[in-house]
Amino acid sequence: MAKKRKERPRAATAEQMPSPAASTVSKIHKESKANASSILPAPPLSRLYAYVIDWILGGIVSGLPAVLVYLALTHKNAMLPDLYVFEAMGYPWSVGIVVGLSCVLAAIAYFVLIPLLAWPGQTPGKRIAHVRVATLDGGLPSVGRLIWRQVIVGFLLEGSGYVVSRYIRETMVLVTRVDVNYYWEIAGMIITAVSLLMFLIVPARRCVHDCLAGTRVVPTEGHPLYQD
């Protein structure tokens, strides 16, 4: 009788191997189910560290369309030019609106798409600081929750903490031809101040955007407070 050959186990193909992002998602889901109630909030210094990095990098990304268009039209460098300058140079007011919308899309790519597609729950700043955005049970926020947290509350209401908020206000002025910039900015400063007080006083360390979006910021692997 012919001996049956033992089949060697096949090596996993590229399609079968989980991506780093998929592995992270799976790990987060397991952790959230296992110890959701014991996950500690990220400490103030870690969140401040992440915020400073994201304010710089996110501001550069958000303002890049305005910088590039201004450079192309004037052959001059300008750090985050306002949208009114294009109409002042004789171009149609619609140029400023298109540039403003481009800045908003760039900001969404940085603050929403990266945490959604590249590093689950993390902007580059949060990645470096070893913290992430989580739901109240420790899971990953959905795309709708991220948009509500970052765009609706963060960009539109709080405003003061994001460079792109200025471009949103200026775009609205160009569209409506009504100067709402000053009052909108003041309201954003007040909401940001309330958010900061909540972050410093409330033990859960949740800001206004966290409370309205049902999220919190927690440590990840590599952080001293991370609980495996």
Image (cartoon, grey):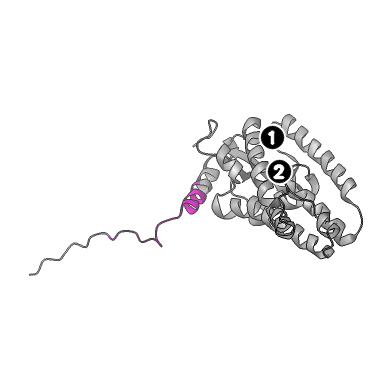
Q: Nearer the viewer, residue 113 or 143?
A: 113
Please state the extent of the stretch shown in magenta in the rendering. Answer: 10-27
Q: Which residue in the rendered view is the most extreme toward the bottom?
A: 1
Examine the rendered structure and indicate whether residue 44 appears above or below residue 146.
above
Q: Quadrant of residue 72?
A: bottom right
Tag 1 and tag 2, C-beta contact below 8 Å: no
Residue 190 image offset from top left, x and y in percent: 84, 39
Q: Nearer the viewer, residue 24 or 77?
A: 77
Residue 205 image offset from top left, x and y in percent: 69, 34
Does 21 appear in magenta?
yes
Q: Which residue in the rendered view is the most extreme toward the front?
A: 75
Residue to which mark 2 is pinned: 210
Residue to which mark 1 is pinned: 205
Residue 157 image offset from top left, x and y in percent: 80, 47
Residue type pointed to by label 2? Asp
The residue drawn where x is 21% and y is 63% is 7
